[in-house]
Image (tube, helix red, strand yellow):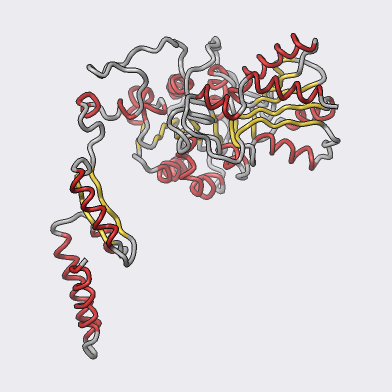
Amino acid sequence: RWVRQTRKDVLQLLRSIPRIGQKLALYAMRGEWSFKSFFTPGMLFEAFRFTYIGPVDGHDLPALCRHLQMAAAVEDGPVLLHVRTCKGKGYAPAEKDPTHFHGVGHFEPETGLLIPSSNKTPSFTGIFGKTLVELAEKDDRLLAITAAMPEGTGTNLFEERFPERFVDVGICEQHAVTFAAGLAASGFHPVVAIYSTFLQRAYDQIVHDVCLQKLPVIFCVDRAGLVGEDGATHHGVFDIAYLRHIPEMTLLAPRDENMLRHCLLTATTAGGPCAVRYPRGAGMGVPLDAELRLLPSAQGEIMQEGERVAIVAVGNRVRPALEAAAAIEKEFGFRPLVFDPIWLKPLPAAQLAEIARTFDRIVFVEEGCLAGGFASAVLERWADDGLLRGQRIRRLGIGDAFVEHGSQAQLRELVGLRAPDIIRAVRELILKD
């Protein structure tokens, strides 16, 4: 602290010298910066008038505490404390392969070897990676871009097959999107694979660099919905809300891994910005069609014809909706309609309008935030078209709160997105006077 005070006093003294004081102070500061630049990498931050402290060994706790106290003592302006750590420090398997140990399931602590999962169903991410390679075999203009997550997004499979058509830009989601826009403007078909929560960082680039230019960039939005133990910072619950209102954007939500394959093919032919959102974890175990097919634009699928109650379920909530419908039929003796919109933008407006005209009791289910989400989009459309006539409507989704840590099953129970929650919502609607 006394060094900083002395520095301020010297600069103030120099500035007080008539006529040449300001220049002398400037020369003194430049000399200080030049001297510091020989010993520290932090001059970039000093140029922004940050007080730079470091680099500090983050594993040396006494040194770290001392430098934290030093940073806390700075009273004039922002401070940047530069701390260096080794990922997996102290655990040899993690130090040797930090990428693999970024996020793991069960493993043997003694060896670091993974314990194979009992669930042999391929993940959505794995199916995406294989399908992307399959599409690239037939389209040499298709390129894959990720932001420091090749294994996490499944694009590592693409990298192995087409290394010259794969780019990992590092932790720079904004650059990934703008780079993809440039490629699209040059006639390529770029696929940007980024987790839903991280794509938020590139919102401005999605708007200005892609959608405003109407460029055919394909956004593969992995980890859409509740992701589990990574917690509030990683849940992908906002993507429907922050993508659907952007002009020119198209948005699809496959209900299972087979539909994901068809959605990817459809996205490559969209001719403009298109996003496909899909969840983390194992797929539904459905058979995969041998041939990919294009999905008709703005057209969903009726999964089950029914009466009295309509359940409109988005993406991976279709299966629990069907389970709930079966339970309702067993309990009350009628089958609810179950509808999968697939297209979140543009909406399957004609089919949804028919539901609004036919059913007085409607349940929406989506693994995303309710504010600005899919149900919000449908109700806006129905209001504009004069289709709201006093129907009893329930919306199941993520409320106005951040969701904590926990397994996906625990969190879906917490927020009310399981089959029993859908059953409860339907029961309340049909028993209410």
| Residue 337 vertical placement versus 5 (above, below) | above
Query: Is any atom of residue 118 visible in this view?
Result: yes
| Residue 45 vertical placement versus 163 (above, below) | below
Quarter of the image for residue 418 reads top right
How many marks overall? Answer: 0
Of 236 and 107, which appears nearest the observer? 107
Of 13 and 199, which appears nearest the observer? 13
- Rendered location of residue 289, percent (x, y): 55, 12
Of 408 and 319, which appears nearest the observer? 408
Of 405 and 299, which appears nearest the observer? 405
- Rendered location of residue 330, percent (x, y): 74, 9
- Rendered location of residue 369, percent (x, y): 60, 37
Single out the residue that lies furthest toward the bottom.
18
Query: Is any atom of residue 190 visible in this view?
Result: no
| Residue 389 vertical placement versus 265 (above, below) | below
Quarter of the image for residue 53 reads bottom left
